Image (cartoon, rainbow, N blue to C red):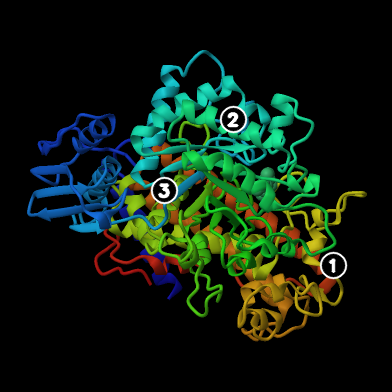
Amino acid sequence: MWNMRKAVWAAGVMALAACQQVKVPSYDGEMLWFQNMANDSKTGIAIEDSTATLKIVREELKQLTIADSVIVRLAEDQQLGNEGFEIKAEGRIASITAQTETGLLYGAYAVLRDQKSNGKQIVSRRETPAYDLRMLNHWDNLDGTVERGYAGKSIWHWDGDSINEADRKRYELYAKANASIGINATVINNVNASPEMLSEDILKRVAEIADILRPYGIKTFLSVNFSSPIKLAGTVDADPLRAEVRSWWKDKADEIYGMIPDFGGFLVKANSEGLPGPLDYGRTHVDGANMLAEALAPHNGVVLWRAFVYSPTDADRAKQAYLEFQPYDGQFADNVIIQIKNGPIDFQPREPFSPLFGALKKTQMAAELQITQEYTGASNHLCYLATMWAETLEDDTYRDGEGSTIAKLTTSKAANVKKSAIAGVANIGDDSNWCGHPMAQANWYAFGRMAWNTSITPDSIAEEWIRQTMPAVPLHAENTLKDMMMESREAVVDYMMPLGLHHIFAWGHHYGPEPWCDIPGAREDWMPRYYHKADSAGLGSDRSPSGSNATAQYNEPLASQFADINTCPEKYILWFHHVDWNHRMQSGQTLWNELCLHYDKGMAMTGHFVASWRRIKPYVDGRLWSDVNKKLEIQRDDARWWHDACLLYFQTFSGEPIAQKTIYSLDNMMDFHINITNYECAPKGYRGE
Ligand code: BDP
């Protein structure tokens, strides 16, 4: 059996070598998912291109080759709303209709996507977006740095009298990329906002940026610092009930709208991680958010008030957002949206959903997801995040009984929602390929696509992305690549923090492991031990009723399910329980062995990714291939680092030998071939295993 496999392997490698002759298109990282677009289209385009947006529509459609003619027109159709479109295709004649120019733009990008990814034919359909605001949150600072950014410096520049040509081109490409996946809003600066952001000089530049983004259907928002009136106007304080402060914000809003008539609104991080906020004056989140809401309301602006509060309290950190916000349910103004991170702590590789989603019944909520890979390997690790986001959006909060998924409670169709929103913390920088890791572009792409339609599967999004980004990849290789992407997040969970472990990162960075970290004098909830609680009895945080009782923040039946170690899903077991090292897991293994096997599996998967990528080599540009290859090798080495560091440390408590299942050899790598079907370059009859 083994020898036969080796023979097949060798033949496969030889066949691969033959395939290397395949002519592959060159890859330009800057062009994202717009690789090798046609420039010789003969398609007739019927469009009144009288405005900036319609000119873009025409320009984009010039790349359409799968239709002889396309008719683009505005028409009344209430059900399509402000952004929806209808595509009709009969043979090689297509039409795109919408009520607005932005709808037509989305329709144009949809047919271009069809050209590459939908069986290469235009599909008749009607589409409307799931969320009203599909937002990127940049964590960019005025000094050009990007907080938790791993793709170079900020794309926004604040010097000079006006935006230079090179920047203008890049912003247009940025806008095009966002519009092509349906992103229609962007907060261009960090939630840890500088008051300077609202100064006149900076606002002038913001207005210039907004002018470039507008024709692409994108609204500009700003993060604001709650103390801005003190810093910019010398008010005695920033008390939200003080008349002087309130009128400063009103005037500021008027000033902004005078410069940017379609300005979106403010994103606010208040009373979290040392930032100022209404609580500093004995006021509440409601007082703060509603004051800003009042200033923006005459202009139809929105306040996104973040629920990420993280300050020293006696309560379990995982309980804090719920404790601070649930009591105010129903008191926020109509144009306030509470922006909640997907998990109760902080973008860990896996967290249960934030219980706040199931607790706010009369308040508009938006999920905040993280596209930048702060806790999932920065721009070095392949971690396709769509699978994580799908998990969150499908989580059932039981708020209004069974089926109250986060998607259902937050999208436009939800009750009490006037304006629905979803936010993703951007992974964009000034690197030539925008995202650092070429594969990380897929996360930007996936965020937009899921924000447009929460039911598209991560699998089909990956497929779309591959077809547009690496157009010469044949079906069998596409499947290999798609499998890598689909398995990558679980691999990261396995080699970093399986079974509900969380926040065992090294002091000073969120990249590598340091579960033993102990900094004298530092806050207890900054230490990994606050989260893993390893001791000679076992591992994990007790958040059941015998511990912090965070489980009680969930609706039934989840509260009881999470509270009982026997019914708690094992993927969260160490999140909710302190588990005995000898506890029998569903597999029959002890907790200790199960933990070892998860780390082992995660590590093995990274070896598998390196091997799989070799099979893609004949079909992609050489530089792209080696860029990704280098990153995958780093990831494989890092996975070993995580495995060794965590298990050797936890072993000092469990006292047991480290279990290992994987034998790292070529044979072992061949075991991972199971995903290959229809392997074109392999000898006839070869079908994987
Ligand atoms: C954490 C980041 C920190 C952010 C904070 C936030 O480590 O840099 O400022 O969240 O979301 O994930 O406000």
Image coordinates of residue 101 in percent, x first then y, are 26, 40
Q: Residue at x 67, y 30 (%)?
A: 195
Q: Find residue 445 and name its label.
A: 3
Tell me which label, 3 or 1, sits earlier in the chain: 3
Q: Residue at x 45, y 72 (%)?
A: 2
Q: Find residue 251 and name its label.
A: 2
Q: Which residue is drawn at 70% across and 85% down?
A: 584
Spot the residue most to the front: 243
Tell me which label, 3 or 2, sits earlier in the chain: 2
Residue ID for mark 1: 652
Whole-angstrom CA distance, mark 3 to mark 2, is 37 Å
111 relative to 5 in the view: left or right: left
Q: What residue type is labelled 2?
A: Asp
Whole-angstrom CA distance, mark 1 to mark 2, is 61 Å
Q: Find residue 210 and name its label.
A: none
| Image quarter (top left, top right, bottom left or bottom right) of the N terminus | bottom left
